[in-house]
Image: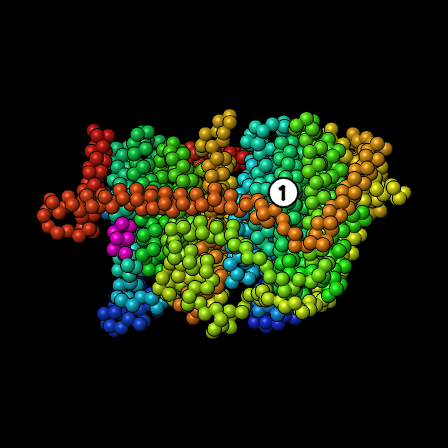
Amino acid sequence: MDFITEYFLSNLLTILILLPAFGALSVIGHQMFWKSEDKLKWITLFWTLLNFVVSLVLIFDKGAAQASGFFFEKNIPWIKAINTNYHVGVDGLSLWLVILTTLIMPIAIVSTWHAVEKRSAAFYVFLLLLESAMLGVFVSLDLLVFYLFFEASLVPMFFLIGIWGGENRIYAAVKFFVYTALGSLLMLAAIIGLYYLQATAAGIGSFDYVVLLDSMKAGNLVLGVQTGTLLFFAFALAFAIKVPLFPFHTWLPDAHTEAPTAGSVILAAVMLKMGTYGLMRFNFTLFPDASREFAWLFITLAVIGIIYGALVAMVQPDIKRLVAYSSVSHMGFVILGMFSFTEQGMQGALYQMLNHGISTGALFLLVGFLYERRHTRAITEFGGIAGVMPLFATFFVFTSMSSIGLPFLNGFVGEFLIMLGMWNSTVLDITDTVNWNYVATMLAGTGVIFAAVYLLWMIQRVFFGKITNPKNKRLLDLSWREIGLIAPLLFLMVFMGVYPRPFLDASRKSVVAVQERVLGQTSKTVAETNANH
Amino acid sequence: MTENNYLSLIIFAPLLGAVINWIVGKRLRSELFSGVIACSAVGVSTVVAFMIAFYDQGGALFAPEGKPILDQLWTWIQVGNFRADFGLGMDRLSGIYACFVTFVGLLIHVFATGYMHGDKSFYRFFAYLNLFMFSMLTLILADNFLLMFVGWEGVGLCSYLLIGYYIKRDEARRAAKKAFVANRIGDWGVLMGVFLIFTLTGSLSFFDKTVDGIQVQSSLNLLAAMAADPFTWGAIVAGGITSIAVLLFIGATGKSAQIPLFTWLPDAMAGPTPVSALIHAATMVTAGIYLVVRCNGLFQNAPTAMFIVAVIGAATAIFAATIGLAQNDIKKVLAYSTVSQLGYMFLACGVGAFIAAIFHVMTHAFFKALLFLGSGSVIHGMHHEQDMRRMGNLKKYMPITFITMAMGWLAICGIPIWAGFFSKDEILYKTFAATNATADATMFGIHVNTILWLVGLLTAVLTAVYMTRLMWMTFFGESRFDYVLPVVENPHKASRAEENSFATGDAHDAVATHHGHAPDDDLHGGHNADDHDDDDEHHEHLTADFKPHESPWVMTVPLIILAILSTVGGLIGVPYAMSSLVGAGDVNAFEHVLEPIIYKKSGAAHGTNEHAKVVEKNEVKNFYASAPASKTAEHATDGEHAAHSPEEISEERWLALLSVILALAGIGIGIAMFGKTPLRAMPKILEEKWRVDEVYNGYIVDPLTRLSRNGLWRGIDVGFIDGIVNGIGYFVAALGSVARSVQVGFVRSYAAFILFGALIVIGYFIYYGFKLIG
């Protein structure tokens, strides 16, 4: 037994990646032998739930809180000719994102319990493959392997939107694919560039993130200013499109609106985080100088995105598109916090990634429930829904409050830490008359006001008042399946808002390590800087 | 440091009540159950609050040096050197607040069980009301800025839920959103202020305390110990103490409905009347004053901010009073009156009379809750008629309501011995006699403080006039129950305009939201059961022989208790100048209790030796005889001289006499104007509330919406950025078809484009890499 346990634990991340892929095979197999589609969703649900349970083992390992390094690490040679390894591991940065992924997947699957009518086998296969790819992104430590997973996650999503999407699905799917693939190709080029630079510096090239980082820290691999900047932007563009950062965001509303509910939920909850995760993991540590140098640019774009996304969300006639634009605004906060290079800001950014995943994921779920009933998402089609669907209205208002950032719900903790971090940051200029860090925070803070405006205005028109559209008179309130789907997310909203410490403690060491690296300081000086603010 | 773990019971009892009502009450649908749960939850809070404030361990109100009683629950957020605890603390200030909030809250809960009788969502109402009590008490008892902010936003949420309680009413849902957004604008200020406090002091705690063996310093003490900012406009944006004070005050204007964010409060009257009494008169709206007084050490160091507070307060007081003159909805009059009275309280804060402000908060809580509940009783008896033009002679039908409301009327007008007289008069006197940094500033050759005082006096007259108008229209004269209201274009034009502005370019939406009676809306036939759910306050057309009825005892008993408090409640804070008239000596207990929480800046003289002695006596009486008490006494004695000089006492008496005469004159004017002609037409601009809503909508909301829709969304997003993206796609597709003269799909051409681009870039990097190697 010990042997099995040990094997299981030492290969945990690989198991996490492979389980959904294996599930996809089982779906195909079932389809081939039984030619029946009605069991497929149960099979898919089984695999994703199993994966969730397995991923929980990560929490109970004490590694994350204690060390800034990686744990559950696995490093085996893959293609010897180009010295690329299958190297995986988690740390405080990726731990919660892995668990968020495995949590969201079963929810996404049950959300489309009755909605997928055509080619359901393919639908579930794509979902499972998507999970494998996303988990791969968060745990791979070899840049080439990371890139492969990053690209691989595009394909299932492309088909999910393109086949099971709404009316304008082809346009949306292609736009999504082109935007994101274009960005990541540059990143591939940069990865290859790094390989050659390492080859020059150390005699043998490497794609391994840890090797490259150590080589840089040891002073072997030194990037010139120009090279560093070039590589930084090659990486950053890929991630900025994924986030999406203004002005690379226009794929998002289309993709979200056209995607089936499961697709929207996964896209919002997990896939957008691949961008912010990548920036924090790779850009900050591999190119710290360029990260500092161009922080002003990202902060500016983040602030624009926060306000712009909120204002555009305000005037959307379609509920789903409104939520999509709100994502642009919320993800702007994440970028803002990261580039503040303060412990509060970066921790807040990491926390806000989870919060956005849960709250916006839940909002897309709820919009999906409404869409299944009425097959429209136009705000004008509704009004007075609270009268016939009181429970649904309650949950919607609750989730919106989390998204608005009401204290004691999760969103507040993240947004507060982000703004506090930005406020106390020294990234932007501090002149005699103006502290631009204050200005950035104050502008970003208006996004919190606008969030209340667009969500409450939508709620007012959709839920309150008298029922004016006779089609809404017979709407059924939430079923037990739907309540069961949303309940864990509601619970997390409260729990993470009231007691965020376990989450923040687990990621602390890793975040501080990134902060040290990007500020180019030793741990002692960083600690002092943190203390002196 | 004193711990008392029962403190958390004060906030968690109502939370538990809310949860029980939400889960169990929903199933039982029993008014008795929901009412008992909600009232006993608040009852528990009340008992515990009074126990801790007055009795336990000597009572928080009498603790030496104003030391708080603390209750640390858990560390909420800790990142780096930032920490915010879930910790509660009751000192003298929060003790007074906790006592009157729980007590008035309890009375209003009891009243509401009668008022809401027959409502379909009885349980929901009481769940929200209990949730509000939880938030409000968290706001008051929090021991740090961040937890206070939790309550601060929490009361905003509950206010939103309760204003929008009648969810089917258009004006209710609009008012709810408006209230939340206006509060949010203010909250932005609080949040930024909190950031700056943390930057300057490294702490957000209110009190010095030890948590988990770590010493946490009080940010308030640190701020109070800093050097005062100069009195300049530049200090506002200097990022120092004045900036903090101004940012926090922005929050206060949102929560306490001051210029420019006051417009939400009158609209908030769309909620049930007990809500108006509890949230929008007695408790929540005074949170702004609590914040300012809590930070009085900070504000005293920021004379510019103090000046702004005083001016905004005085301006709001008179501005709202003029609007209150011309309203016909009984609740609207009271709403504007609340805005006006809150202005008084800020005026007091602005001139440094923090204790007077809190005193007025408390007396106002009594008499305004009384007036609102009285109006609720009237509305209840009139079958949900709120328009005073259709009332009259109600004293005949509702004697208890009439007598109790008359007590409130005398109190708010400032007639001696009624509570409002002492508190309002103290504010006016302190304004007149203020010795703050702005005392030397002049405007038109008159001292600024004199101008503020004159504005305050004028407001007092106006208050008496509009309140008398309200009393006469409601209770005297002939009954006008069948009076046909003149056709007004649209009573909610402003809010409709707002709705319109959002909906421009979305004609369909405009139709759907505006006309409750779309053609297919079967308004008369086929009522769904749930159609009745929420609009219990529907209007009926009353007939001339309609007989209003007096309200049941659950409603009249709270009225009577509040009427007694409004009558004698002011006696706990009688200033020396008054009490010495009847030879009672110094009996201003209220001031003595609060004195230790007001930071003493050198140069600003407060109190006297006499005070110090009384403070000492109090301390001795209250079990803390030894060293700390005498220290307090010394503290109070420091640098103080004869504030009770004979000249000042006589000055205060003359001024008091003047304001009484003016109040009586106001009542006289009111009777003269409206006694015989209760329906006298008022200036249109006042009836239209100075058209502030229209200005906001026309100059802020509309342009912003149009910019967002046509400029940002259709222009930049869809037009510009997507235009480029699609243009590239189109270009490549065209290129592809020319090059290969084969029909290619978009996907393939995009793919080709990607490949092409990637090859160039990869090629460049390889070339670059080789160049580096070579």
Q: Is residue A445 rendered to the left or right of residue B272? A: left
Residue B454 horizontal/vertical position (percent): 71, 36
Q: Is residue B47 visible?
A: no
Please identify the residue farthest to the left as the structure is shown: B741
* Quadrant (top left/top right/bottom left/bottom right) for the C terminus of chain A: top right
Q: Dot 1: within a 10 Å radius of its alpha carbon, few (fewer than 14), some, or many (20 or more) residues? A: many
Q: Nearer the viewer, residue B5 or A337?
A: A337
* Quadrant (top left/top right/bottom left/bottom right) for the N terminus of chain A: bottom left
Q: Residue at label 1? A: B319
- Identify the element where label 1 is drawn: helix
Please identify the residue farthest to the right as the structure is shown: B583
- Disc 1 marks a residue whose amino acid type is Phe
A174 part of magenta stretch:
yes
Tell me which corner region of the image, top left, top right, bottom left or bottom right, holds residue A168.
bottom left
Residue A517 horizontal/vertical position (percent): 41, 36
Q: Residue at x 45, y 33 (%)?
A: A427
User: Which residues, given as a range, are shown in magenta?
Assistant: A168-177
Q: Is residue B646 rendered to the left or right of residue B686? A: right
Q: Is residue B439 above or below residue A86?
A: above
Q: Residue at x 67, y 58 (%)?
A: B375
Q: Is residue B396 above or below residue A423?
A: below
Residue B231 horizontal/vertical position (percent): 63, 28
